Image: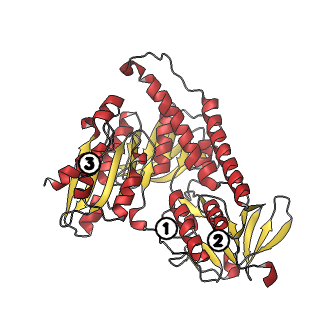
């Protein structure tokens, strides 16, 4: 009934980077907010994705650095991983962050409703609790932020034993002697790096002609060399046709040279995600869909009044920071504030192997395809004082600018901690900053960020 549905009431289904940010932003704007969540607060990103994987990667990166102690003037003999502790720490980090969201909800007055949410007609949401009990909530506005889950290949469904997805990779039933990773996006590449650091024989298989296929070609080439250097077998332009399961998994792979077979103890499927849009009442509520994705306008409104959608359930990049940005923009619109649309042309992407990858804006192949006259400026970290002092010489800064007006078009980085450098470059891209302006910006010395300034000087010198 209308009296149960005040104008400033809002329900969020899902508590991942889109959902929890939307809830907190709405509470800040004066809304009465309820969040429906069937699992732990924080969604896949915080519990089974971004955060716990970074904890795992930090463990092996610390171990790898310790093994290089002689180069830095100290000895660290027989450095070995404590497997149980590495994975336990990852879970502890995830639990800590989840509790942090609970604290923020309590502080902001956001009410958490545990259970699975389903949209009902008439601005209602049905919630089924773990014990099977059902309740119905009402609100003027509902934001769907149910995220996504790992997808399976039809010929290699995830079974949790021989064929894994990211969840098993985060909490493995055992450490295999060998692993075949299908898919070399950020998830596949990070797990390949992690398990190889633990001594696992890893083969990374990619359908496209390069690893990290969404990155600039120069980035892909550098990463491929780095992975091979650490002993990972990289197979590009390779399509897995079948996976047989016995004592080992036997993969049939179509390559440029013909058909090959590969044996591995486990197969890690890292071929993308599928949106969680089933079983949440969208069809019954009349919400328009397109290939399992929810159709929204620029304000994240669906075709049904009062229902909004953000994050992995809509047709925008499936990244945590995208979902969070959409949450802010969506709530701004609902609250009647100035609506600031998300700029999808400059979304940053990062891969947290060592050295890291970070990029934003156009790749060189895209600039060529658009027919834009352009220039490229590069600076190798081997020429950067801070990088040399830190023993982090691998990698480079690559900047692409418009040849006519000098406007920055793309930023592509490989190097130690470059994920911490890309945020400022997104600001530059968003505001049409030119190479000349960046070249006259005073960067602190010595820092790896100075390589950005040096690459800019190359651009304006031509």
| Crowding near the residue tagged with mark 3, few <14, some 14–19, many ≥20 C-alpha atoms within 10 Å | many
Instruction: Label 2: state its secondary structure.
Output: strand
Q: Position of residue 111 (x, y in %)?
A: 76, 62
| C-alpha span from label 2 to label 3 | 42 Å
Q: Name the residue under label 2.
A: 143
Q: Position of residue 280 (x, y in %)?
A: 70, 70
Residue sitting at x 71%, y 64%: 35
| Crowding near the residue tagged with mark 1, few <14, some 14–19, many ≥20 C-alpha atoms within 10 Å | some
Q: Please tell me whether mark 2 or mark 1 is closer to you in this view.
A: 2
Q: Are marks 2 and 3 in contact (CB under 8 Å)?
A: no
Tag of residue 256: none
Residue nearest the observer in this picture, 31 or 274: 31
Residue nearest the observer in this picture, 82 or 436: 436
Q: Mark 1 points at which residue?
A: 316
The image quarter in which residue 9 lies: bottom right
Sequence-wise, the earlier of marks 2 and 1 is: 2
Sequence-wise, the earlier of marks 3 and 1 is: 1
Instruction: Label 1: state its secondary structure.
Output: loop
Q: Please give the count of numbered marks on the rendered protein.
A: 3
Instruction: Label 3: state its secondary structure.
Output: helix
Visible residue check, residue 246: yes
In-image side of 170 versus 259 (left or right): right
| C-alpha span from label 3 to label 1 | 32 Å
Q: Mark 3 points at which residue?
A: 453
| Viewport quadrant of the N terminus | bottom right
| Crowding near the residue tagged with mark 2, few <14, some 14–19, many ≥20 C-alpha atoms within 10 Å | many
Visible residue check, residue 1: no
């Amino acid at each position: 009934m209308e009296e149960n549905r005040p104008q400033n009431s809002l329900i969020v289904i899902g508590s991942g980077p889109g959902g929890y940010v939307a809830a907190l932003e709405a509470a800040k704007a004066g809304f009465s907010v309820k969040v429906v969540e069937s699992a732990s607060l924080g969604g896949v990103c915080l519990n089974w994705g971004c955060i716990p994987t970074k904890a795992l990667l930090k463990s092996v990166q610390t171990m790898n650095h310790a093994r290089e102690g002689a180069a830095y003037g100290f000895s660290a003999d027989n450095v070995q991983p404590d497997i149980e502790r590495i994975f336990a720490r990852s879970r502890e980090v995830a639990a800590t962050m989840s509790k942090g969201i609970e604290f923020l909800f309590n502080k902001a007055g956001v009410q958490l409703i545990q259970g699975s949410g389903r949209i009902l007609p008439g601005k209602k949401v049905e919630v089924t609790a773990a014990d099977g009990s059902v309740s119905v909530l009402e609100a003027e506005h509902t934001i769907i932020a149910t995220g996504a889950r790992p997808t399976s290949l039809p010929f290699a469904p995830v079974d949790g034993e021989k064929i894994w997805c990211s969840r098993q990779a985060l909490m493995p039933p055992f450490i295999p002697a060998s692993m075949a990773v299908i898919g070399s996006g950020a998830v596949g590449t990070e797990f390949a790096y992690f398990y190889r650091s633990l001594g696992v024989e890893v083969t990374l298989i990619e359908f496209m002609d390069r690893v990290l296929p969404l990155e600039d070609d120069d980035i892909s080439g550098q990463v491929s060399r780095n992975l091979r250097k650490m002993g990972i077998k990289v197979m590009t332009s390779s399509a897995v046709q079948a996976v047989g399961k016995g004592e080992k998994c036997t993969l049939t792979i179509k390559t440029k040279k013909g058909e090959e077979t590969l044996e591995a103890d486990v197969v890690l499927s890292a071929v993308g995600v599928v949106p969680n849009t089933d079983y949440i009442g969208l069809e019954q509520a009349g919400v328009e869909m397109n290939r399992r994705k929810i159709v929204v306008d620029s304000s994240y409104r669906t075709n049904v009044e009062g229902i909004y959608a953000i994050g992995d359930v809509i047709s925008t990049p499936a990244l945590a920071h995208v979902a969070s940005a959409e949450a802010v923009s969506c709530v701004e619109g609902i609250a009647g504030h100035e609506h600031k649309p998300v700029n999808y042309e400059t979304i940053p992407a990062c891969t947290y192997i060592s050295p890291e990858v970070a990029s934003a804006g156009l790749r060189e192949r895209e600039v060529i395809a658009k027919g834009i006259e352009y220039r490229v400026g590069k600076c190798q970290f081997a020429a950067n004082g801070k990088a040399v002092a830190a023993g982090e010489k691998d990698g480079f800064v690559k900047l692409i600018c418009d040849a006519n007006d000098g406007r920055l078009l793309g930023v592509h980085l490989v190097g130690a901690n470059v994920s911490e450098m890309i945020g400022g470059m997104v600001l530059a891209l968003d505001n049409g900053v030119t190479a000349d302006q960046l070249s006259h910006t005073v960067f602190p010395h010595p820092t790896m960020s100075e390589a950005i300034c040096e690459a800019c000087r190359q651009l304006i010198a031509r």
